[in-house]
Amino acid sequence: EVHLVESGGVEVQPGGSLRLSCAASGFTFDDYAMHWVRQAPGSGLEWVSLITWDGDNTYYADSVKGRFTISRTNSKNSLYLQMNSLSPEDTALYFCVKGGVDVWTEPLDHWGQGTLVTVSS
Amino acid sequence: QSALTQPASVSGSPGQSLTISCTGTSSDVGSYNLVSWFQQHPGKAPKLIIFEGYKRPSGVSSRFTGSRSGNTASLTISGLQAEDEADYYCSSYAGSSASFVFGAGTKVAVL
């Protein structure tokens, strides 16, 4: 059974930095692309970032490009999101999501429970 | 990376059918049959219920069906049940921007 557990979400001041982690189990981690998707309180889902199975290619939403960095360590079955220059608009529940073998054509098929990031002074 | 357009809410009585629309552009929904639909109950993580426009993951009820016409994808829930009350989100690959885009979500109420 696929299991994704996010951690690292805390309250941080505007302009601050944070690193989220996601521990994956129940599947061959280094076969699949991985995503981060966020959900602001009371709002909808927003795709944030994607990394290919080997970490060689990364993609970002315009809203986070240049501030966030996605990475992975396949030997540890772990996904990360480094978040810099945080603003209140980044306040959200951040989900770690399993993608497909094919980055673009296969769906986001398993989701973690999310970790809450709050940006506030 | 503009969001897909969904109605804010739809409602129906038990046993009825309802349809949720998801309108994009020729850069996303219209060009790729790669629309996914997710169901999210309050306080829970989203769950994939439709992918590649019409396919259902194992274990998802056949009461959920997906379709597409032009730039608009649709999710139909037939034989509406109380447990179907949830938020539903569509998503599509947006090739021109190498990204994914979500709709704003539709709240389904079972009267």
Image (cartoon, rainbow, N blue to C red):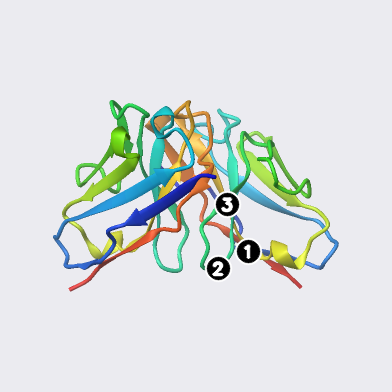
Residue B42: which disc?
2
Q: Is residue B95 above or below residue A16?
A: above
Please name the residue shown 35% across and 39% down the image.
Answer: A77
Check if mark 1's residue and mark 2's residue have beta carbons within 8 Å. yes
Q: Name which residue type carries label 2.
A: Pro
Instruction: Look at the numbered disc 1 and give the secondary structure of its residue.
Output: strand
Q: Quote the CA–CA distance across marks 1 and 2.
A: 7 Å
Counting from the top left corner in percent of width and height, residue B101 is at 46, 43
Task: Work out whether mark 3 precedes mark 1 in sequence or the reverse, and give the earlier one.
Answer: 3
Circle 1 crowding by C-alpha within 10 Å: few under 14, some 14–19, many from 20 = some
The answer to whether residue A73 of the structure is visible from this angle is no
Task: Work out whether mark 3 precedes mark 2 in sequence or the reverse, and give the earlier one.
Answer: 2
Counting from the top left corner in percent of width and height, residue A43 is at 45, 63
Q: Quote the CA–CA distance across marks 3 and 2.
A: 12 Å
Mark 1 — on which chain does it sit? B
Mark 2 — on which chain does it sit? B
Instruction: Look at the numbered disc 2 and give the secondary structure of its residue.
Output: loop
Circle 3 crowding by C-alpha within 10 Å: few under 14, some 14–19, many from 20 = some
Using residue A118 as the reference point, say whether residue B19 is left or right of it.
Answer: right
Q: Name which residue type carries label 3.
A: Lys
Residue B86: which disc?
1
The residue labelled by disc 3 is B47
Quadrant of the image occupied by residue A71: top left
Using residue A12 as the reference point, say whether residue A50 is left or right of it.
Answer: right
